[in-house]
Amino acid sequence: AQRVTQPEKLLSVFKGAPVELKCNYSYSGSPELFWYVQYSRQRLQLLLRHISRESIKGFTADLNKGETSFHLKKPFAQEEDSAMYYCALRGGATNKLIFGTGTLLAVQP
Amino acid sequence: NAGVTQTPKFRILKIGQSMTLQCTQDMNHNYMYWYRQDPGMGLKLIYYSVGAGITDKGEVPNGYNVSRSTTEDFPLRLELAAPSQTSVYFCASNGGSSGNTIYFGEGSWLTVV
């Protein structure tokens, strides 16, 4: 079964501190992994996906197939990074995304 | 470019009432989805559609119905509203030139009292 696990509901850090949002998945084939971000009362936006191996707003994420993880990292958190972050998996022919329960990142000044 | 548009943004329903959440996209996407977002539960897929005339159940379809008569529109209907359906609903779409990137609407806040 497809599943995405985000173990932390809330992650609170100080501005300038490193950030790591954890995401683990279970999927029998080769999944596509994504990170979506939702700022307060706004729609979800794609942050990054593992295929493109890009860095967006200083965030990076590496797919580790051995550990079935796709953790999101940023070396120095900014206050504007405060938001809800969702890890998502896409697999199969239907294109649908399976989301984790989300992690609320709170960056303190 | 409007993207994915949902209406209404806010609605209060009484138990047992029915209503339809409208969703339309102008990107000629084949795939469309309805999710509900509950605190601490993330997003759960209600229904999805891979093209006009084709719909299928997601993780939490009970209490909802959908139709896809055109590529652009994917309305979600609640027939007998229940308090458990109090949630934020997001419509999304992808396909065509957007590839695998899924675009979301702004959300519809629904309260059932």
Image (cartoon, coloured by chain):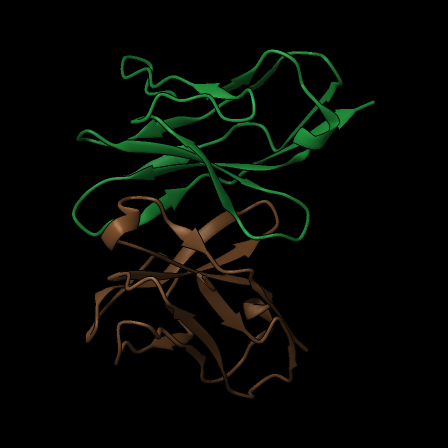
The residue lying at 64 percent from left, 85 percent from top is: B14
Q: What tint does the image give chain A?
A: green
Q: Is residue A72 left or right of residue A79?
A: left
- In this picture, is B56 found above or below A81? below
Q: Quadrant of residue B57?
A: bottom left
Q: Which chain is brown?
A: B
Q: Give the image location of residue A33, x and y in percent.
A: 34, 31
The residue lying at 38 percent from left, 20 percent from top is: A69
Q: Give the image location of residue B74, x and y in percent.
A: 35, 73
- In this picture, is A11 found above or below B53? above
Q: Give the image location of residue B96, x and y in percent.
A: 23, 54
Residue that sits furthest to the bottom in the current view:
B17
Q: Quadrant of residue B24?
A: bottom left
Residue toward you, A88 or B4: B4
Residue that sits furthest to the front in the current view:
B1
- In this picture, is A17 found above or below A43? above
- In this picture, is B43 found above or below A67? below
Q: Is residue A36 left or right of residue A67?
A: right
The residue lying at 43 percent from left, 72 percent from top is: B23
Quarter of the image with the C terminus of chain B is bottom right
Q: Is residue B51 left or right of residue B19?
A: left
Residue that sits furthest to the right in the current view:
A109
Q: Is residue A92 left or right of residue A77?
A: left
Quarter of the image with the N terminus of chain B is bottom left
Total marks drawn? Answer: 0
Residue toward you, A16 or B33: A16
The residue lying at 55 percent from left, 62 percent from top is: B107
